[in-house]
Image: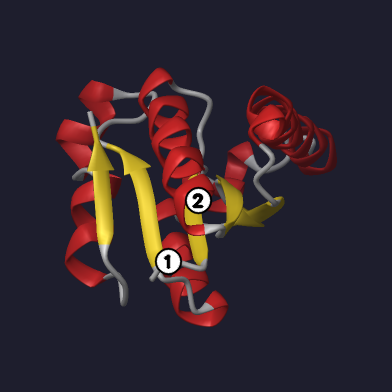
């Protein structure tokens, strides 16, 4: 039934709990799991052109990349003992858009994600990523608390 499972990770406890559920499902169905981390496009967070000169985008991008790779690798190490085939993928952009797009392009059978990420207040103000993904994903979505 499930052969390809996508798990977005942001380093939060709920995302790691979702990864644990996905690994259990994958082990039952002999499925492949892809851990996905979406790093934000920094240009969207700096709206004042005068601030662009202050930021060293290359350094910030390297830091966000390193952070994302650490999150993905830590999760892979945590769950590799279960014998499930785990891939990792790092993308840049708006998390909900990139997750939905990856679901489509990767033709995943299931998306497993946490109900809340790193920022409860941010999620309340901006709209929950899990809420947006649930409404627009092309595959079944399992939201884990």
**In the image, what residue occupies the spot 46% across and 31% down?**
20
The label shown at residue 59 is none
Residue where numbered disc 1 is placed: 2
Of residues 142 and 62, the one nearer the viewer is: 142
In the image, residue 3 lies at what x, y percent? Answer: 51, 68
Side of 69 where 135 appears, left or right: left
In the image, residue 99 lies at what x, y percent? Answer: 45, 61
Side of 136 where 109 appears, left or right: right
- In this rendering, the answer to whether 13 lies above or below 1 is above
Q: Are marks 1 and 2 in contact (CB under 8 Å)?
A: yes
Q: Give the SS element for disc 2.
A: helix
Mark-to-mark CA distance, 1 and 2: 7 Å
Task: Tell me which label, 1 or 2, sits earlier in the chain.
Answer: 1
**In the image, what residue occupies the spot 24% across and 23% down?**
120
Residue where numbered disc 2 is placed: 26
Q: Is residue 47 visible?
A: no
**In the image, what residue occupies the spot 66% across and 23% down?**
78
């Amino acid at each position: 039934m499930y052969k390809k499972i996508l798990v977005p990770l942001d380093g939060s406890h709920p995302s790691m709990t979702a990864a644990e559920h996905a690994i259990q499902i994958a082990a039952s169905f002999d499925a492949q799991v892809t851990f996905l981390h979406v790093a934000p496009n920094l240009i969207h967070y700096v709206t004042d052109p005068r601030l662009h000169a202050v930021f060293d985008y290359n350094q910030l991008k390297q830091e966000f990349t390193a952070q994302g790779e650490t999150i993905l690798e830590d999760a892979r190490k945590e769950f590799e003992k279960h014998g499930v085939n785990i891939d990792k993928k790092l993308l840049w952009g708006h998390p909900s858009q990139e997750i939905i797009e990856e679901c489509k392009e990767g033709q995943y059978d299931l998306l497993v994600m946490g109900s809340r990420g790193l920022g409860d207040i941010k999620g309340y103000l901006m709209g929950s990523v899990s809420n947006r993904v649930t409404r627009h994903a092309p595959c079944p979505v399992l939201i884990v608390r």
